Amino acid sequence: MGPFLRLGNAAAAAGMATILLVAFGLQFGLKELPCPLCNLQRVAFVLCGFGFLLNLRFGAQPLHYALTLLGALFGLAVSGRQVLLHIAPGGSAYGSPLLGLHLYTWALLLCLAVIVLVALLMMFSARPEHHNTDHQAALRFRGVYRLAAYLLIAATLANVANSFLLCGPFECSDNPTDYWISKYLPT
């Protein structure tokens, strides 16, 4: 994999981690709990990020790009559904807007951007790297590439823990007002 392609995949993986961390930070900063559709959008960004991460670790392959595209299409469907739920005039939106748009609208735009980015990266990857050994790929998986991987894994684990604390082992509320775990904590 060429340096441009490696850098593109690393930047995309770090971008997915940043999206997850920003959503996570806004959740606590604005004291707004994510709805079930918001959590599904986060899952879509995790899938996209791990597709890029697989390219970094094992070389650019169509299967990895397919995972990223499936994640982006899933995110597009979920965020599109949420946009359509709140698009009616006089209807109420969910959450506070960020730079004039709600997070689900940003998710829709970012999923479209991921699809375009994957198309561009696939144009630059001439052929799958089946000739590389696992050892060669592991040697190139250092520095900023490894940092992008750790950032994505940390963001994913933080969102998994948050979702469990919010919903517990049950179905999430449509409009959560409190964490599930708070019922069991002493006040």
Image (tube, rainbow, N blue to C red):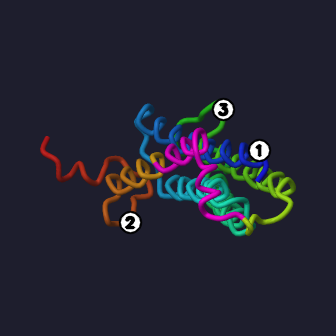
Quadrant containing the C terminus in the rendered view: top left
Circle 1 residue: 3
Pointer 3 or 2: first along the chain: 3
**Residue 130 can be seen in this image:** yes
Mark 2: few/some/many CA within 10 Å (<14, 14-19, 20+): few
Q: Residue at x 60, y 33 (%)?
A: 98
Please, is residue 11 above or below residue 183 in the view? above
Circle 2 residue: 171
Residue 64 falls in image quadrant = bottom right
Element at label 3: loop
Label the magenta part by its dominant secondary structure. helix
Q: Name the mark on residue 100.
A: 3
The amino acid at mark 3 is Gly
Q: Residue at x 61, y 48 (%)?
A: 104
Q: Residue at x 62, y 48 (%)?
A: 13
The amino acid at mark 2 is Glu
* Residue nearer the viewer, 101 or 6: 6
Residue 180 falls in image quadrant = bottom left
Q: Is residue 143 magenta?
A: yes
Q: Position of residue 139 (x, y in %)?
A: 60, 51
- The residue most toward the left is 186
For the residues labelled 3 and 1, the Cα–Cα distance comes to 36 Å
